[in-house]
Image (spheres, rainbow, N blue to C red):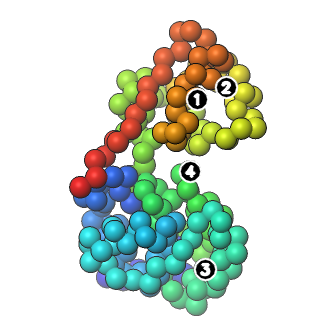
Amino acid sequence: MYFYKMKLYVVPTPIGNLKDITLRALDVLNDVDIILAEDTRTSKVLLNHYQINKPLWSYHQHNEHFILVKIINEILIGKKIALISDAGTPAISDPGFLLVRACIKQNISVECLPGATAFVPALVLSGFPVQRFLYEGFLPLKKGRQTIFKRWNEEDNTIVFYESPHRLLKTLNELKIYLHEQRRIAVCRELSKKI
């Protein structure tokens, strides 16, 4: 299979069930020279399951600023690189935006494949209106939470955000304080069971 050189492929990975990956994503992962992974141990489970054996580089929020130039240089010399996250689409509450922006600045083509993103099934399953919604990603741990909650109280659209299971109860209690009584909340988890 031939792919255009000087391109970064942003490849969504399953959010649970390993079968929730597209055939096109598997083709790209089999064809690239290097795969950038948020956590190489997590990604190896997926890659081993599909017998994909490619060099795996660690790319996460703690090293993305340091490794960025090296990745760009690899693409510029003709290496085909795919970016994956632990689960879902890279750059959606995961590392990736800095790399995509750097590629655009260097006139490197970026191709984002369609695929798994946790908030879409959660949004649909909520039964709330989805014509317009506000996506907030992960909430700050401490500073700025109250400001966000107060702003949400003025928001009429459906709001989607991610929260750790360890902080969920605390967040729900905070929402009771800041949001009006008629505001409905849906909590979704395990949207795609692991196999």
Residue 145: % across, % down: 70, 32
Q: Which residue is mark 2?
A: 149
Provide the residue designation for mark 3.
71
Q: Quadrant of the N terminus?
A: bottom left
Crowd tier of the residue under label 1, counting other residues whose Cα lies within 10 Å: few below 14, some 14–19, many 20 or above? some
Q: Disc 1 or disc 2, which is closer to the eye? A: 1
Q: Earlier in the sequence, mark 3 or mark 2?
A: 3
Q: Which mark is residue 93?
A: 4
Q: Which residue is mark 1?
A: 171
Residue in view at x 66 percent, y 18 percent:
178
Q: Quadrant of residue 33?
A: bottom left
Mark 1 or 2 closer to N-term? Answer: 2
User: Would you place residue 56 above or below residue 18 in this image?
Assistant: below
- What element does badge 2 sit on? helix
Element marked by disc 1: helix
Mark in the foreground, 3 or 2: 2
Rendered location of residue 185, percent (x, y): 48, 22
User: Do residues under tags 3 and 2 come within 8 Å of each other at their CB atoms?
Assistant: no
